[in-house]
Amino acid sequence: MLQNNNKKIVIVSFADLGKRRNFKTADILPLISFLKEKGLISDIFCRINKNFDFSSTFSMVPEILHYFISLSGLLLNNQFFSRTLEEKIFDFSTAFKIKKLKERKIIFFHPNYYFLKSVKTAKEKGHLTIGLTVTAHGEYNANLEKEEFERLNLKKDFEKYAIYYRLLKKGFYKNEYDYLIAWSSFVKDTYSKYGSNPEKIFVAVPDVDSLKFFPSKERPKNFRVLYVAQTTILKGLHYLLDAWKKIKIKNAQLFLVGGWGFVPPRYRKRLESMIFKDERIKWINFTKNIISFYQNSSLFVFPSLTEGNPRVLREAMACGLPIITTENAKGLVENNRNGFIVPIRDAEALKEKIEFLCYNQKLREEMGQESRKIIEKKESFGSEILKIYERIVGQQ
């Protein structure tokens, strides 16, 4: 039984906090801030803490070691190696810190698939473990990867470049949490499919900073389609490019923002040949000025084959954009209200919906307004998590 004076939460996150941030920071920071204000957090174990404003925040990976590992990955031309090594160091350090916790805690792990040793240690010590599941189940994603590599005639690259397959092979999805909090109903369904008890899986949707991301008063005169992602095979960019080459809209532009993730060179070369031969397509690598791209676009298209609840989609909605996305990536998108949801791998459906919204400006504007309303009316992530926390505590 969790006693009242022991209802304290430990946050374990692969995010950077304070003056340093990484991709994980944006999703977990609002939750940390909310729970911190409620006085519920006892400790935070993050990747790198750089002057974060909570005294019991600890770095699990020394910053100098992080840079050394990153440099090693560049020299070896193996991002997966450096990332995996850093994750193992994080996991080992976190397990050591968990051993020292004196009272029983509720420990949130973000995301849920890095912490084999830490979760095992926490359970051995009698702590309650909750995994924040930010993506679909690894086996589901690995099966999608296998199918996609075969469809793209990239079988020879599969074992080296299939991210989820490699994580699954290394046992990253073997954690047995007491509870899971899924980023979306789609994520919950995939975990239920692969053996998790659906009664112990809750759903909560992360926040987006609606003061930072907001609509522009003016939209571009020309029709501009925006895609934002660190592109991997499962982001489905090849389907968007297949759709785009069939679209003959005068003065239309497609902006591709975010650069490349971990992809086979043959795949990258194939897509770049399509991108750079088309003057209507603008390739933009990673940028810190992403808001201006949202605010200067007409439509956001996200053809991903699998997602948790994509942050870029929520950012686009906050900026008042209509959305075209897939059934596995829809997040907060409501079909026919603030955009369209299409099947995965359907370039023809993408083409039809892009053209439809291009020639229906009034509907496009109305859908963009609905996107903003959905974000504004959404219950805060912290509030959703607090309700789940209270329910779990009540069950103990």
Image (cartoon, rainbow, N blue to C red):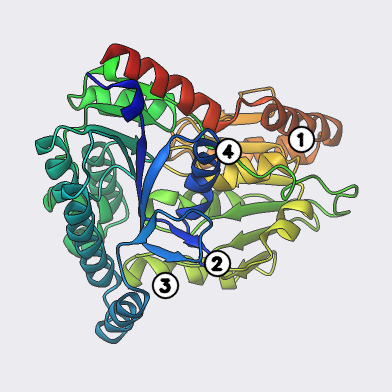
Kindly indicate the quadrant of the structure image that contains residue 190: top left
**What is the three-letter code of the residue carrying label 4?**
Asp
Q: Earlier in the sequence, mark 1 or mark 2?
A: 2
Q: Earlier in the sequence, mark 3 or mark 4?
A: 4
Q: Which residue is mark 2?
A: 19
Q: Considering depth in this image, is 372 or 67 the residue closer to the camera?
A: 67
Q: Which residue is mark 1?
A: 368
Q: Position of residue 213 (x, y in %)?
A: 72, 48
Give the alpha-carbon distance from disc 2 to disc 3, as whole Å: 36 Å
Q: 10 Å neighbourhood of mark 1: few (<14), some, or many (≥20)? A: many
Query: Which one is in front in this view, the residue at disc 3 or the one at disc 4?
Result: 4
Query: Which one is in front in this view, the residue at disc 2 or the one at disc 3?
Result: 2
Give the alpha-carbon distance from disc 1 to disc 3, as whole Å: 34 Å
Q: Considering depth in this image, is 213 or 245 the residue closer to the camera?
A: 213
Q: 10 Å neighbourhood of mark 3: few (<14), some, or many (≥20)? A: few
Q: Which residue is mark 4?
A: 207
